[in-house]
Amino acid sequence: MQFLSALVLVASVAVGHCVPINNALPTANQIKELTEATVLFYNSALPNTSSVPLPSFVNERLRIPEIDTDITVTAKNGMAYGINQVLFGQYEFDASTLATKFRLTNLNFTRVYDMEVEGKLFGHKVSGEGVMRQEVLGEGYDVSNLRFEEINNSLQIASLELNLLMANLIVDLEGFTVDGISIQQLEKLMENYVLTKFNESKEEQSKMIGDMMKSQFNKSWTGYSTDEVIQWLRDHSNGSGQMEFIQKHINSFARVL
């Protein structure tokens, strides 16, 4: 889920940390302005194009004994599509607690590779040259109970709860030879495996990424008040310095089964 980590880093850039001495709460209006500035910054950081090339790899060996998988893969001519189709929505603000919630999702992230494979997948021999297409639908996260405070004039995340999302995964294989089952059955095995592993690790991964998000930016914004962070986001909402985050998001999909 490195992709989600990268998106969290971009979308939640307004936070800070320092030794607690003087505490204050941002006003409801400041939180509204902070949200608007963050969304503007995030949107401006997305690439203007909907597709980018993916890195190639040669003779990569994948071994997963638990599902009787041992396969060597060479992939080239990779392309990722839908990289700028990100939806910010379901925003709510509780004026009584100053808590914010929202959902951020990548509507349809697709990667396509020309591949050469040799080995076993789920106990079935697979070989040949062909094309693999993988669509990840509705991947993203729900953020809730997001509350800010100022400590020594530094904006900081006081609390947040994170829940990772993945609506569906679609795998399409063309041109490969599979022994014992149909290509459609192999596709379904791959889809079910990835979705099952995602659901099994979702709670742990959600907490890990949420803690990382809070820690990273509570350190990054030391010395910046709420108003200063808002202004910084507005001043830097042209995306010029943010493409590295997006590229990491794209590259993280290159080695996923």
Image (cartoon, grey):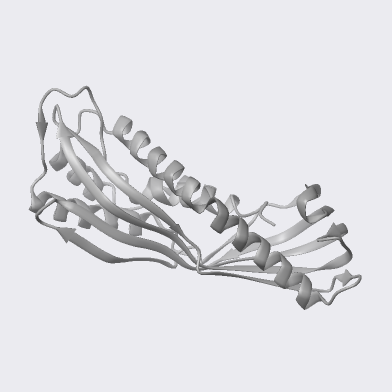
Please state which of residues 89 and 67 is positioned toward the viewer in this rendering.
67
Residue 54: x percent and y percent?
A: 64, 56
Point out residue 56 in the picture as x, y percentages from the top left corner. 72, 52
Nearer to us in this view, 174 or 185:
185
Determine whether, in the image, residue 229 is placed left or right of residue 240.
left
Q: Is residue 93 visible?
A: yes
Where in the figure is residue 152, as x and y percent of width and height? 14, 26
Q: Is residue 60 above or below residue 83?
A: above
The front one of 163 and 86 is: 163
Would residue 172 be found to the left or right of residue 122 on screen? left
Residue 224 vs 160, above or below: the answer is: above
Give the residue at x 45% y 41%: 208
Q: Position of residue 153 (x, y in %)?
A: 13, 30
Q: Residue at x 66, y 54 (%)?
A: 256
**For residue 85, what is the image quadrant?**
bottom left
Q: Residue at x 88, y 70 (%)?
A: 178
* Quarter occupied by residue 212: top left
The number of discs equals 0
Write down the quadrant of residue 227 in the picture. Answer: top left
Q: Is residue 149 above or below residue 79?
A: above
Can the viewer see residue 240 in this picture?
Answer: no
Q: For the C terminus, give its image quadrant.
A: bottom right
Q: Is 21 situated left or right of 157 in this image? A: left
Residue drawn at (20%, 43%), measured in percent from left and top? 148
The answer to whether residue 176 is left or right of residue 239 is: right
User: Of residues 242 and 224, which is closer to you in this image?
Assistant: 224
